[in-house]
Image (cartoon, grey):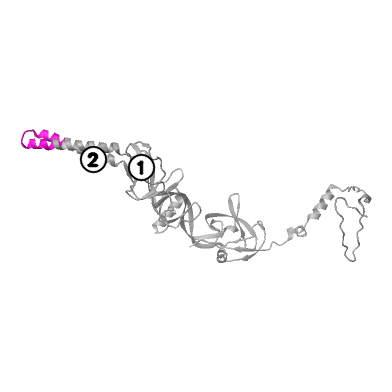
Amino acid sequence: MFRSIGHQARSVVVPPGAVPCRLVPWSRVPPFRTVRLALPLTALAVLIAGCGAHPAEEHHEGHELGRFQASTPYRTDTVVLQEYVCQVHSVQHIEVRALEKGYLQDVLVDEGQQVKEGQLMFRIRPVLYQAEVKRAEAEAEYAGIEYRNTKALADSNVVSPNELALAEARYDKAKAELVAAQAHLGFTEITAPFNGIVGRFHVRKGSLLDEGELLTELSDNSSMWVYFNVPEAEYLAYARDKEAGRGTQVRLMLADTEIFQQVGEVTAVESDFNNQTGNIAFRATFPNPAGLLRHGQTGNILMGRRLTDVLLVPQKATFEVLDHRYVFKVGDDGVVQTTRIEVGPELQHLFVVNKGLGKDDRFLLEGLRKVKDKDKVECAYLPPDSVMKHLELYAE
């Protein structure tokens, strides 16, 4: 009887016609013997290589490359969107500062609050300035009484005209001091100079303020100014488009890559170029009715540049070697030739070709990894219109 070690014996069902295997007790199993094979290393390498080889790879050099798709450049007029990093500024963004010294008695607005022109925002404790006004009122009243008495005496020829002139001057001075005291009292109440959004507070209620101390900022975000820098060559293209009555409208791409709903317009160009960067500053104005844009935001300006009679090739038909871009140009005999091209502006899925290809030159659309220079291939020609229909093309 067979006795298993560590496992429970199980019955084995033998199919009909099969030769049953006889179970041998472990004690009767003869010991294993190590068999040494003496093969030369070269023979062993050939054996291993022969086992891993595939029949298809044995005749790689002689196999057909197959049939590839080819086309010619697409000739058209289009608009290229130039992208520029930009900064967003409020049309009006000011610092709100204290005009008088004193304790900040009341803070009547909150950070981020929308305020109206003339709305009271801060109040400085006015007790001292109220006292100054009362003293100035008393001095003005005293000077007025003195002036009227002197005038009555002057009318009776009791005092000289010079005395009357001096009394009148003292009265005018007292009235001016009263106006100044009233102005200082008015400065204790700080109101909004225009409709806007309150910024961050730099002081709190009860703070001791110095004259000119910063309280907060106020931004008018009804319209926004967006600043961006444009290279000289692109500035010249913009100037020609503007002279032709087009090209002044721009779009704004926000930080999350969403396009701002409102369309902006270039409203100002700086007077001179930056000699260090070769750029010139542009300013575009965007309506901001929903208040989405805030002062200090960043984004990218998208400015259209019109291109006429240019050649376009799909990006997938090109490859890059050492910072240079190439295509496989197909000759009349079907032989492909590695051809360097110079590309201009980039569109979605497309390159504008400046040099290297003519409008009738054929190039491979696919199989760039399967062919090499001077290979002879069989091509199926696709018209450029058909190729463009399968690409997401932005063109006008």
Q: Which residue is mark 1?
A: 106
- Residue plotted at (47% across, 51% down): 299
Dot 1 alpha-carbon crowd within 10 angstroms: few under 14, some 14 to 19, many 20 or more: some
Q: Is residue 164 left or right of residue 138?
A: left
Residue 103, placed above or below residue 14? above
Q: Which label sits in the foreground, 2 or 1?
A: 1
Q: Would residue 168 be counted in the magenta stretch? A: yes
- Residue plotted at (20% across, 36% down): 138
- Whether residue 161 can be seen here: yes
- Residue plotted at (86% across, 54% down): 8
Give the Cα distance between marks 2 and 1.
25 Å
Residue 108, placed above or below residue 51? above
Q: Tell me residue 90's x, y (percent).
A: 40, 49
Mark found first going from the N terminus, 2 or 1: 1
Q: Is residue 185 left or right of residue 89?
A: left
Quarter residue 134 falls in? top left
Q: Amino acid at mark 1?
A: Asp
Q: Which residue is mark 2?
A: 179
Q: Would residue 323 be counted in the magenta stretch? A: no
Give the overall secondary structure of the magenta segment.
Answer: helix
Dot 2 alpha-carbon crowd within 10 angstroms: few under 14, some 14 to 19, many 20 or more: some
Q: Tell me residue 336's x, y (percent).
A: 64, 59
Magenta-colored span:
147-169
